[in-house]
Amino acid sequence: MTTPDTKSLGQRVKELRRAAGMSQSDLAAAMGRSESWVSQVERSVQPVERLSVLQALADALNVSVRELRPDAPPAEESEPVETKSNDLDGLRVALTGHPALGSLFDQPHNRPAPSLADFQQQVEQAWTLVHASSYAALSDHLAKLLPSIETAVRHAPAGDLAELHSLRAKAYQVAAASFTRQDQADAAWVAADRALQAAELAGQPLEVVASLFRMAHAFMRQQHMEQAEQAARSAVAVMDPRAEAPTCPAEELSLLGAMNLVLAVINAREGNRSGTHAHIDRAREIAVRLGEDRNDFDTEFGPTNVEIHAVSTAVELGDAGFALEVAQKVNASGLSPERQSRFLLDVARAHAQRRHVGEATAAILEAESLAPEQIHDHHLAREVVRDLIQLSGSRVAKPLRDLAERSAVL
């Protein structure tokens, strides 16, 4: 049997939270964090190594730091200088204030700037970390990359500026996407706005649109649908006439299609069936014209993603039967595990709406096998699990109960 001394921090947090009669959302609110962060801490996925964060946890739970972590240093001891970021804290700090203030005062920068190829590799690595849901590592990575590229762009020769601004835009897009997925939409908006400015300085209008795509998602996560719609519509209004030209580049068509999918989701969440179907149909036309699944600007736009959104929006509108009918024709195996997992989550939601407990459980377990962090932390996944447990009554299947434990739903 586990003794108090051998319990993990996550186990202690969970027990103390329950003893205090708090839900994960209560603890998250008390700390100014997201519910997914609390869930990750309790499952020992998210490390908590800074004394200041431990103290905040202890204060929220009304216990001492030593009750949370017996080996913690006494309060009077100073915190170690070298600590790893928790969640996206370090990245939030990196976004605070001016990104390269010293450059305005001609402060010397002794380290040689990375090459354009190095910056390109680092931006690609950042996207890899996002798709792996490695947010602590991503925080450290971008917290170093962003100030470095901001300094470089202020000292680079004129011939390198356009490419540096383009890479800077892409790096901020990574930050915006990661903040959105971690329910930190305020920071996502800041990152998307900086990406937009950098893209314009790079002379890359399509990167500007890609930045607006990230901004729209940030607004959606904040439930600011009017602002999300404005961001998407402003892009569609400019790009739609250009798409009529037979020579319109595939990358531009992908962005136009992705923006229509954003508008479809917005309309679905507002209960507008005709608007939802109109934007799905428009995206489908563009996808047919492209003729293949693509990943321009990391949107994964193509015929498959359109049908996945057709399923998702149908679920939002409560049309579970239609969602399942469309889902039967979808083969998402060519998309990223993260995207496949989200599709299966929507399939599970549709089955749950039809009270198909077994089918819904099977779908969400398959989704978990592809992207466990997404399923454990996504608020929609947690809602489905709760609904399935309620539908099961006193006969909750063991796989579903185990998933509820892993997701900290029970």
Image (tube, helix red, strand yellow):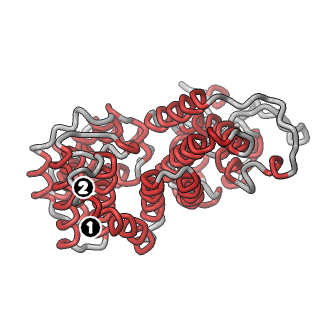
Q: Is 368 above or below relative to 185?
A: above
User: Residue 323, how many percent across, how many down?
Assistant: 15, 55
Figure check: 321 above or below 124: below
Mark identifier at residue 312:
2
Instruction: From the viewer's perspective, tell me whether residue 94 is left or right of residue 306.
Output: right
Residue located at (40% from left, 44% from top): 297
Compare residues 229 and 80 and report the one nearer the observer. Answer: 229
Q: Which kind of residue does numbered mark 1 sit on? A: Ala
Quadrant of res 122: top right
At 35% from the left and 66% from the top, the residue drawn is: 238
> What's the residue type where badge 2 is placed?
Ser
Residue 5, by quadrant, is top right
The residues bearing labels 1 and 2 have C-alpha atoms spaced at a distance of 9 Å
Vertical side of 174 occupied by 112: above or below = above
Q: How far across and down, in percent of the image, does residue 397 sit?
A: 24, 40
Mark 1 closeness class: few <14, some 14–19, many ≥20 residues within 10 Å: many
Please identify the quarter of the rendering in which residue 82 is found: top right
Name the foreground residue: 260 vs 103: 103
Q: Which residue shows up at 10% across the image and 58% down it?
A: 322
Q: Position of residue 315 (x, y in %)?
A: 22, 59
Secondary structure at numbered mark 1: helix
Asked if disc 1 and disc 2 are in contact, CB closer than 8 Å, the reply is: yes
Helix, strand or loop status at disc 2: helix
The residue carrying mark 1 is 268
